């Protein structure tokens, strides 16, 4: 009498990052943790002058030196993480959420809704991003809500076009036709059929747009239209300490390294997402 032995099902591997993906994830998580705990981690208040020498070197007291007024650069970079990461995260969530909702609606409803939305975002996308940002911030004033909304509006057209292209492809598939024959409405099609099938590419697009927003925010701050003194994001720290560049001052080097580290790490994380998440559509 023979007995049948059942072989165990293979375990599914979840989020198997390689080395570069793990490094990128670790740096991104570290930046997020610093942004959350910034007031507790900063050795000094953001505007306190702690050194009589400007552009001071690294020392046991000031690990990253001092800025052009003698303020602790480590404290300013830590507290600036909250502005850089927070503003960029808020803007990218608004841009991608609005773009995905409007893109799926245009693909499902079609007709004049698709035509009006597409032409409107085409017109908005034709305005250069930096010019639009300069115009809005200079006209309305520089504040954190204005920066978040301006950056979100700049990247909303791209998020809309990307989500609409994905949704149009899914909208032509057989299971969408079956759902329509069953009598399902647009809301059901969007939430239950289309959104689960475009979630992976949308998350990857969100990461890329986060990088673009960080760079644009740093550019606006470098021009003096970002976070205003005494607060500062990383781009503003580079601008205000630019005079120390001929001396190789840490005050201008380390904010630049922080911007590069965050943007490169997010790119590494996106590039090493599991294929079934990144390419699912």
Image (spheres, grey):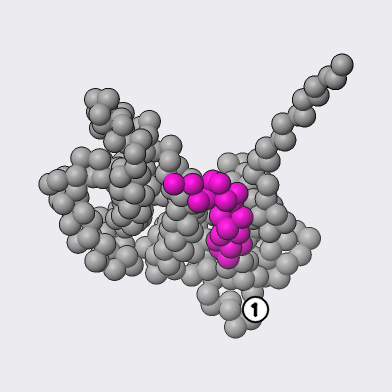
Single out the residue that lies furthest toward the left.
112
124 relative to 278 in the view: left or right: left
171 over 76 or under it: above or below: above
Q: Residue 274's spot in the image, x, y percent?
A: 60, 49
Residue pointed to by mark 1: 248
Q: Is residue 264 visible?
A: yes
Q: Residue 66's spot in the image, x, y percent?
A: 64, 65
Q: How many marks?
A: 1
10 over 128 or under it: above or below: above
Single out the residue that lies furthest toward the bottom.
246
Circle 1 residues within 10 Å: few <14, some 14–19, many ≥20: few
Was residue 270 drawn as part of the magenta stretch in this picture?
yes
Q: Quadrant of residue 19?
A: bottom right
Depth order, front residue of 8/134? 8
Q: For the magenta stretch, what is the residue range?
A: 259-281
Was residue 54 drawn as part of the magenta stretch in this picture?
no
Element marked by disc 1: loop
Q: Residue 281's spot in the image, x, y percent?
A: 44, 46
275 relative to 222 in the view: left or right: right
Q: Is residue 77 visible?
A: no
Q: Quadrant of residue 70?
A: bottom right
Single out the residue that lies furthest toward the top.
1
Q: Residue at x 25, y 40 (%)?
A: 108
83 over 171 or under it: above or below: below
Q: Residue at x 17, y 57 (%)?
A: 119
Single out the residue that lies furthest toward the right.
1
Q: Quadrant of residue 171?
A: top left
Depth order, front residue of 148/1? 1
């Amino acid at each position: 009498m023979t007995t049948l032995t059942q072989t165990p099902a293979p375990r599914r591997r979840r989020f198997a990052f390689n080395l570069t993906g793990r490094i990128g994830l670790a740096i991104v998580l570290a930046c997020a943790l610093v942004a959350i705990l910034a007031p507790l981690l900063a050795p000094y208040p953001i505007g306190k002058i702690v050194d009589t020498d400007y552009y001071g070197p690294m020392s046991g007291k000031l690990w990253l030196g001092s800025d052009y007024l003698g303020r602790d650069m480590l404290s300013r970079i830590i507290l600036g993480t909250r502005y850089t990461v927070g503003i960029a995260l808020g803007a990218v969530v608004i841009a991608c959420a609005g773009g995905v909702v409007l893109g799926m609606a245009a693909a499902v409803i079609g007709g004049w809704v698709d035509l009006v939305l597409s032409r409107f975002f085409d017109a908005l996308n034709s305005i250069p991003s930096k010019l639009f940002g300069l115009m809005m911030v200079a006209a309305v004033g520089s504040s954190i809500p204005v920066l978040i909304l301006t950056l979100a509006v700049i990247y909303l057209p791209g998020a809309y076009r990307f989500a609409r292209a994905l949704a149009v492809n899914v909208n032509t598939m057989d299971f969408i036709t079956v759902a329509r024959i069953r009598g399902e409405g647009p809301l059901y099609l969007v939430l239950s059929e289309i959104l689960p099938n475009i979630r992976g590419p949308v998350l990857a697009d969100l990461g890329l747009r986060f990088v673009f927003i960080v760079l644009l925010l740093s550019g606006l701050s470098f021009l003096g239209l970002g976070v205003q003194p005494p607060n500062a994001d990383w781009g503003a720290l580079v601008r205000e300490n630019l005079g120390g560049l001929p001396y190789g001052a840490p005050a201008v080097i380390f904010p630049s390294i922080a911007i590069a580290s965050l943007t490169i790490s997010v790119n590494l994380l996106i590039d090493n997402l599991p294929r079934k998440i990144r390419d699912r559509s």
